[in-house]
Image: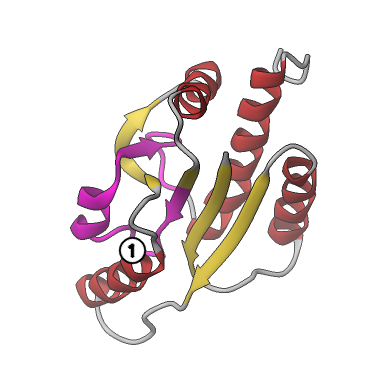
Amino acid sequence: MRYRLVMVGKHERGYVQEGVRDYLGRIGRMASLDEVVVPEAGAGGPEHQRRTEGTRLLQALRPDEHVIALDEGGTMLDSAAFSRRLAHLRDTGVRQVAFVVGGAYGLDDAVRQRADLVLSLSAMTFPHQLVRLIFVEQLYRALMIMRGSGYHH
């Protein structure tokens, strides 16, 4: 199975990006994971930014992809349940999964509607840059659980 991380923003610098790069390297030894970054909307209010970024995210998605959108209002899964979900997708023949991370004001409703699963990492709100780091660690953890590794203990 191939994965894509489709996100709003720019490639960050500093500790967040160092952590993201570390986990992307680890994931890359087990699975294919591509990053797709769409530009932030820039000026305008929150609704304008969500709508503009939502359009850009939707344009970046492929018609045959299984889409998992990360949103604080989504379903919460623990790490083992997330791993089981990915294993089920793999076992049922899903070939491509896109994980979508919105911008500073979250996801547009159109992106949530396109998603096959809307997933929440926490009931708390995180900066969208930090979500990248938290999520790639969880993806790595899920893949390690699928392999039977002791990483998840």
The residue type indicated by label 1 comes to: Tyr
Q: What colour scheme governs how the chains and residues are painted in the rendered image of this protein? A: secondary structure
Res. 2 image quadrant = top right
User: Can you say whether 4 is above or below 11 in the image?
Assistant: above
Relative image position of residue 41 (x, y in whole percent): 36, 80
Relative image position of residue 27 (x, y in whole percent): 72, 42
Q: Give the magenta-colored segment's residue range.
A: 98-125
User: Can you say whether 133 is above or below 129 in the image?
Assistant: above
**Residue 113, can we see it?**
yes
In magenta stretch: residue 150 = no
Query: Extreme bottom residue here?
Result: 43
Relative image position of residue 18 (x, y in whole percent): 78, 57
- Decide: few, some or many residues near mark 1? Use Cα within 10 Å; few <14, some 14-19, many ≥20: some
The residue positioned 32% from the left and 30% from the top of the image is 75
The residue positioned 54% from the left and 53% from the top of the image is 4
Q: Is residue 88 left or right of residue 51?
A: right
**Residue 69, can we see it?**
no
Residue matched to label 1:
105
User: Can you say whether 12 is above or below 33 in the image?
Assistant: below
**Could you tell me which secondary element the residue under label 1 belongs to?**
loop
The residue positioned 66% from the left and 19% from the top of the image is 145
Q: Quick one: 26 or 93, which is closer to the camera?
A: 93
Q: Quick one: 76 or 32, which is closer to the camera?
A: 32
Which quadrant does the N terminus fall into? Answer: top right
User: Can you say whether 139 is above or below 107 in the image?
Assistant: above
